[in-house]
Image: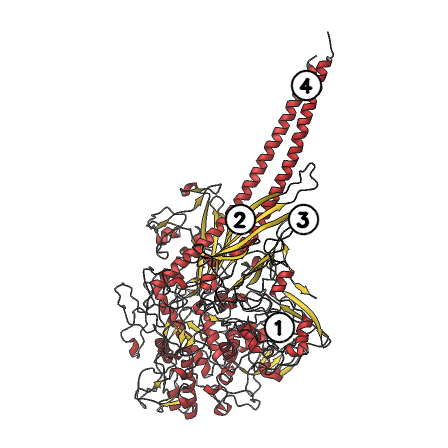
Amino acid sequence: MKTGMTLIEILIATSIGAMLAAAAAAVTLNVHRISARNLARLTLHDDASVIARTLDRSAQSCHPGGQWRLESSPGDDASWGTGDEWVSLTFLITPPARFDRTLGFGPEARSGTSWFRLRWDAAKAPERGRLRVSQGSALRNVETVRAGRTLTITQDSSPRRDRRRPLDDNDLRLVPGIDAATYTSLRMPGDGQDLDAYLVDVLAPSTSAEDFHLGWTDRAGRRIEWTAKTGLSVRNASGAAVSAPAGDAGWSANSIVLDGDFLDGRPHTLLGSPWSSGATRPLLLRLSVTLVESPRRDVPLSRGREIGQVFRFSFPLGAETFTP
Amino acid sequence: MSIPRRGSIFLLVLGLTTVAVTLAFTFIVGARLRREQGLGDGASLLAQQAARSGVSHAIDVLTRDFLDSPNRAGSFGSRWFHAFGPIDTGLEGKETNSPNNDNSMGFEDSPFDRNENDVRTESRLVEMYLNDRKSGGNYRGRKTPFTKGWYTSRGIARWIEPSVFHRDLLNKPISFHLSHPAPKDTSSSDPALKYRGENYLPDVSQPMWYDDHLVPVDDRTLARFRLRYAVSVVDLGGHMLSAPQGEYVVPPAGVATAVDAVGAAEIEPTLNEKYADAFVNLSAQSPNMLRPWVAALVWRGQGVWSDNIWGGGLGGNPTAFPAIASFSGTVPAVWGDYDDRLNVAPIAPEPDGRITQPIPDGGTAAVMSAAGRQVRYTFDDGSRARSWSADTWNYLMTPFARASRAKASPTRFDEGFTDVPWQVNVLTAPARTIASMVFAYLPKEAQLLKYRDFKKSNWVSFDPVWGSNGWNGWTDYTQNTQVAHPHIDLFSSPDFLAKYQQPYPGSAPTMWAGTNPTAANDTPPVKPVGLDAAKWNEYLGGDYNINNWWKIPDNQMFGSVNSPLQNSIGRMYPEYPNEGTILEQPWAGGVRIDINDDNVGAYLDWTSGMWYTDSYWYDLAQALTSTIALTQYAHQALDGRQRLNDPTPDGIPRWPNVPGDSDYASRAGTPMLDTDRDGDGVNDTPSQLASIAAIDRQFIKNLGEYPQSYSTGSRPINPHTAITIGRSHQHWVQSVPTVTVYTPSANIKSLRNAGKITAGQAKLMELVLNDLRMSFFGASGQYPSFAGIDFDDDGVVQCSGYTGKTATAGGTGYGPIVPVDQRISLTGCFVMQQSRFFRIIVRGQVFDELRRYPVAEANLETVYAIDPSGLIYDVNRAPSASHDPNGDKLHTDTVDMSASRILFQRWLMNDYQGDKLRSYP
């Protein structure tokens, strides 16, 4: 009775084993790649989720009584779609207030309002497009020594309704009696500078924001859209292109700045513009972005391809839309 | 052999099984986590949706109430007020009229709302009214504790299910636990059945019930979760405008001036300048607003700042706005001018604040802020005596109001005969608003403790109004001085000096010299304004004695929140009430009171106060506030809801018998307010308190004066019968107020006739009375017929509205109608109009029926304006051509309700919202 295996059996078994091992290796490696891709996709969705949460909360808090500012630039080359564009959207929000201080843990926010800024910067490969947000501080200070004594000056966010009002005019420039030398030496940042100084990334370090579209629909049904490829455009409810009102300093080729409503609901008279704030205030904020996840270097046999997905968002602007 | 092979197979099977189980378990865990996360997220979103539903419901009620209310002013009888009020706890606890047997409204552990129809007391939303109570209230005799009744805000009182309610929210509430219809059953222990019954169906029934997986279900018995919301609506028309918003004024290049700063802050410059001092006074009327200089910053749109982070105290000098700073160092620092602090050249001219002395302070940090115009004032921790109460501020001041415009013939709701920014709806004004207006108007002498020996081992600081009387230090001392809270004499302010001129009562020492007291140390700046022992308008049962200088009997209580002593003591000593203080009148026979642990409550507590009760100003304030309380009480008749054992048989306040008053002849027992209760379009009864002129008329009578027409020489001497109100003026409080008829002890003519005052003093009193009427009533666009009255019956009417301040009395004893362009108001006037600006706070919840507990919650605050352009009703509440009771014109053209909108909205959360300091080099 033979107790061993024939050569054929051994060869067949070895072949089968090799085939199984190869298949297992392939499966394993593919699973790893799939895992990496899925991880990348999950990262993209996490990033998208962060965008949604951040903007949704801010959009719901949008204060109709504040300015609405879209500012952009085609970059140094003055051409759109070349990878050096940027756009920022700034509006006044009413951050959630602590409801019951008996259950709270610290001082309440001092200001009823704060500024919010969303900024996208294009980039040429291999740099990544950055999407950042910032919220104005209600408590910022500078210290200086005057007459041998230390003086601390504290500044809060300042609401602004009129579109002509600069975002940085609460940098002490309007303090009665202040002279140029004192003003310069104090260097108190205004709200705009404060926003820029504390911009933080929304996306994961490995994620790039590309092909950015930003726009809104206003109360009159106009659709305002900004894209990195074409810049700013305005269309009416019928889809026809609309030119900026003549003489309206709030509208330009690269920016739109809108008035806020009066807090007593009085009607508006826009200087040099046939449009009132009652018609120009945004109702629905729209955003479209292609999020691109770079390949991970720690994943073996990665094919080096980026994972990209287009995300589109619509955010109703809180109180702006909530009318009976 | 085959054994190894079998074993291999076994091991293989075992391994595969392990893998399968692991995968399955992982899948299950993942699915469960995902589901739980999904449920949590879903519940949060549903709670937000519930809150939004509540806002929609509130706006629906507000809009309908507005459109349905031609000729009716917003009041506590309006539907928007009572619709969202409690139902079960509102019925319970009315078994007796004993003030000691009040039952609680939403009080914790209350047995009367076991079914969770009502929300437990939300103290945060009504804290301002709680403060009123704590500080004695501002209406005569209000004593009912906050937890035992409803005040001018009901907080978030009652749960409603989204899309499951009856539109008659007041009379047909829907209890969650009942299957409708549910007949009344007096034998039931369930209050909803015992006292009310709900024998009807909801006329809106699109329930949102959910099963365990948050999947909607149609059957309540299958529902695990359901949505609910509770709504609080506050009429901002009863609050006071702060920092009137103006057009942006582009500041010129170069060195800014104060005017530049105001214009650049989008503040209306004319109103801002003219009424800044009045705003300081308005803000001073609270122990929680102890540093009214900060008010100057708020008023000028420069924002506010708090000491709760740095220490050092609130303070500042309005002369130096917007900068307030103190310095670290070994020498006690002072608050000072901004130019001084920055060592820059002072601006010229500086703002016209007349308070120039720096406030002593031991601050160790420097603070300056220009927070800007606020939509909400949340900036303190509320725990320090020297900080402001954000909630008090919220419920007194508001940026959401229309500043009035001066018009010769007012037609719109926001037009009046003056440009005073504060046109207050008298029917919904909280007590604090009324008190602030009245006390801000009075001269500071009326709120002055004239003499005092003060001995206290503590650090003290007096207001710079009195300059050298301030001191600081940590040593014992005794010093004769006087105390008054920061207060600017508006009559002598540059903005109004030309109108009132000097001397004016309260600032005319020679007029009243020697009246009382006469001690040698009665030295300037003491300015007697009293009438010696005239017992002016003594309330029957009052217990006047010298102790009234320190403590006013409860039935004379007026509001210690405004008493100078409390303000000053409270400001000096955060631990107030303070023991160890000696109060002494240092003239012969003067009373000395040593405040100690045993008696501190008797002399210095929150429910009594210091008031110069012998002053005519005291009588004016008493008569005015009691008249307004009576008016608000009368208008609650519109609620039309009977309370258990309410002595008013149907919840309708009725007139008492008022002997000797022709206005009330045959009126005893009739409803106070003329309302068209039977719906035939005709008022059921004539009314006494349905117009500003009518309130003025009652105010005059409450002073013992006669508003009726009398030719010169025939005006009666005996004081007119008056009506006042005891206890709470809100009849839904179990301790039902008592409408009291009494006769004041004197009027101007009787005093003059008895020789207690001179002819000159009588003229001056008449001037004071007519001017006060003009400021609070005559400035209203609803009172074009306002005229001065010859109260002293000498044929000449004294009123600052007349050229030369006098006019000849006509055959009726009235002077001519005061020219509308000469009317003036210092601290605001009253109107009775439809309410247009509301603050709505909604709490939305997802309620777990299984655990009987809310599993998710969202709170939403909203400010809503109805017809802010005033196109629907005119200044007198009459409907305009745009009025459409059916609402068909909504959003259809430019002359309809399309201007209505939400002005402000925010979520209220328990998130940590502390401020993170950002330091710049």
- The chain that hosts pointer 3 is A
Q: CA distance from mark 2 to mark 1?
A: 41 Å
Q: Do the dots labelled 2 and 3 sit on one chain?
A: yes
Is residue B12 toward the left or the right of residue B170 in the image? right
User: What chain does badge 1 belong to?
Assistant: A
Task: Say if labels 3 and 4 share a chain.
Answer: no
Above or below, A6 against B648 in this view is above
Nearer mark to the viewer, of 4 and 1: 1
Local packing at callout 1 (Cα closer than 10 Å; few below 14, some 14-19, many 20+) is many
Answer above or below: position of B4 versus B475.
above
Asked whether the beta carbons under mark 1 and mark 3 sit within 8 Å of each other, the answer is: no
- What's the amino acid at mark 4? Gly
Look at the numbered disc 4 and give the secondary structure of its residue: helix
Mark 2 on the same chain as mark 1: yes
Secondary structure beneath disc 3? loop
* Image spot of residue B151 (x, y percent): 44, 65
Tag on residue A126?
Answer: 3
- Give the structural element (helix, strand or loop) at label 2: strand
Numbered tag placed on residue A312 in the rendering:
2
Disc 3 crowd, CA 10 A, few/some/many (<14, 14-19, 20+): few
3D distance between C-alphas at marks 1 and 3? 42 Å
Disc 2 or 3, which lies upstream in sequence? 3
Q: Which residue is mark 4?
A: B7
What colour-coding does the image apply?
Answer: secondary structure
Q: Are marks 4 and 1 on the same chain?
A: no
Q: Which mark is residue A173?
A: 1
- Disc 2: CA contacts within 10 A as few (<14), some (14-19) or many (>=20): some
Instruction: Give the alpha-carbon distance from disc 4 to disc 1, as whole Å.
Output: 88 Å
Question: Do the CB atoms of the residues marked 4 and 2 lie less than 8 Å apart?
Answer: no
Residues at discs 2 and 3 in contact (Cβ within 8 Å) = no
Name the quarter where the C terminus of chain B is drawn: bottom right
- Indicate which label's residue lies in the foreground, 3 or 4: 3
